[in-house]
Amino acid sequence: MRVILYLTSSPKGRGAFSRLVGDELLARLVEAYPGARVIHRDLATDPPPVPDAAFSAAVLGAAPDDDPAFATSEILIGELERCDALVIATPMHNYGVPAVLKAWIDQVVRIRRSFRSSPAGKVGMLRERPVFVVVASGGWFTGPSPSGTPAQPDYLTPYLRAVLGTIGLNELAFVTLEGVARGAEPAERALASARDSLVQLIPLPPM
């Protein structure tokens, strides 16, 4: 593993639970693969532009890849193509992905560039690579809360599986932190559980 692309998307920056565990996951990857180079994109501090009318016209008109409307898209797809692993650290906002992560997705999921149409449906054009997704949620979405409150809707994890699968990335592993906005004790339990998941997900070589 030579290049790791690391996307962070929380407006809380380094104080975010997703960023904290994402950093720890990244550190384990770097330790497991010494010499790996990290490309870090903080989507919250430097958000990708939302596709505009020029972008839409270029897509519909099958413009060449060097069309100015695709300038940002080409940069972001290029980073994705160069990486051997993708790490996404994200909060869950209103049951789904934050707007800045959606903007990144809308730049990289591009017909004739990262996927193509076929009679059988969309076919990804990017090579497979592992994708690690750290998700932090204020509530609980994989099951009821400890007090029995029903699980909240989850449109984030199925969406990421579907949209990244569209471009050829199907090896997704999720690390979840739930209940992080419900007080210190639930947050500590969520951190401990996520760290246990990291140990199982990315074993380190013996010292």
Image (cartoon, grey):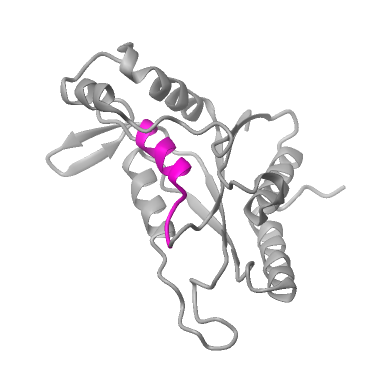
Q: Residue at x 22, y 25 (%)?
A: 59
Within the magenta stretch, is there residue 104?
A: yes
Q: Is residue 62 left or right of residue 134?
A: left
The image quadrant that residue 195 belongs to is: bottom right
Q: Which residues are magenta?
A: 95-108
Q: Is residue 169 left or right of residue 31?
A: left
Q: Residue at x 67, y 68 (%)?
A: 190
Q: Is 113 rendered above or below residue 103?
A: above
Q: Is 76 rendered above or below residue 32?
A: above
The image quadrant that residue 198 belongs to is: bottom right
The total of numbered circles placed on residues is 0
Q: Which part of the image, by quadrant, shows the N terminus?
A: top right
Within the magenta stretch, is there residue 93?
A: no
Q: Where is residue 116? Give x, y as percent.
A: 23, 32
Q: Residue furthest left?
A: 119
Q: Where is residue 99? Give x, y as percent.
A: 43, 45
Judged by its main secondary structure, the magenta piece is: helix
Q: Is 16 rendered above or below residue 64?
A: below
Q: Residue at x 26, y 38 (%)?
A: 123
